[in-house]
Image: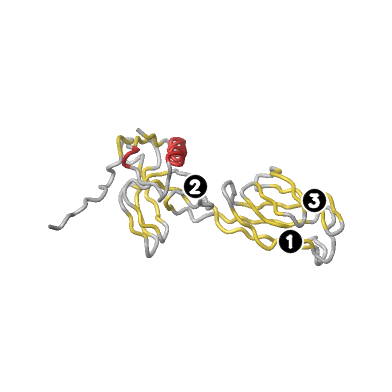
Amino acid sequence: MTILSEGTHAAEFLVSEASGSRSRERITVLSGETLVAGAVLGRVTVGAATPAAFAGNAANTGTIATVTLGAGAKPGVYKVVIIEPATNAGEFSVEDPDGVTIGTGTVGAEFVGGGLTFTVADGATDFSAGEGFTISVAAGSGKYREHDPANTDGSQTAIAVLFDAVDAAAADRPGVAIVRDAEVNTAELSWFTGANANQKAAGLAQLAVAGIIGR
């Protein structure tokens, strides 16, 4: 005898939503995602990071080769400025795109803060005070993917719930999501593989900030 398994229906997770289409929004699901109705979503808000030396730097003062983005990274231009020069070393400050100093670091040692991880490498010429680098963090695509706190592109924050299943395995696909003013049945939500109780609770708290309340 053939056994058939019924999948999750569109909007099966909804307890209530605002009148009309206020709770819903058309979205683009990122290529590579295969999601069921009720999938908890995040949005890609941060793109690649590109470091560049200040125009006034002396030749061969040093480099930033690689920047790794993490949770908390913002689109825009960060500034890394030498504040205490030293022979084959030095101290620098890091300013985020809003002009807020997020920390200080040491040339040759890994800096972690504000969603960035990088190392300023010393060059043949020592740094002078005021020299430094910019780190330009591109804005993300705005597309949606499955929420996972391990992601670093913005989708580590839960902000929406997928209305109906979308198969974007091969290419970006359109979809509809619940993004505001709604109540959802937490037992009907679909989470990333391996999500534990604490991670689900954190995701529900993030959804609540967006006006999506778990019941």
SS under mark 1: strand
Colouring mode (rainbow / by chain / secondary structure / one colour)? secondary structure
The type of residue carrying mark 2 is Pro
Relative height, residue 213 to residue 65 (above, below): above
Quarter of the figure with residue 20:
top left
Residue named by callout 3: 91
How far apart marks 3 and 1 lie (CA) works out to 16 Å
* Residue ID at (25%, 50%): 7
How far apart marks 2 and 3 lie (CA) works out to 32 Å
Residue named by callout 1: 53
Q: Quadrant of the C terminus?
A: top left
Q: Earlier in the sequence, mark 3 or mark 1?
A: 1
Quarter of the figure with residue 51:
bottom right
* Residue ID at (86%, 55%): 86
Q: Earlier in the sequence, mark 2 or mark 1?
A: 1
Q: Residues within 10 Å of mark 3 (few under 14, many from 20)?
A: some
Extreme left residue here? 1
Q: Nearer the viewer, mark 3 or mark 1?
A: 3
SS under mark 2: loop
Relative height, residue 100 to residue 119 (above, below): above
Q: Quadrant of the N terminus?
A: bottom left
The type of residue carrying mark 1 is Ala
Left or right, 35 with reference to 148: left
Q: Position of residue 73 (x, y in %)?
A: 59, 49
How far apart marks 2 and 1 lie (CA) works out to 32 Å
Asked whether the beta carbons under mark 3 and mark 1 sit within 8 Å of each other, the answer is no
Q: Position of residue 145 (x, y in %)?
A: 43, 53
Please name whichever residue, 128 or 194, is drawn nearer the observer in this view of the structure. 194
Q: Residues within 10 Å of mark 1 (few under 14, many from 20)?
A: some
Residue named by callout 2: 149
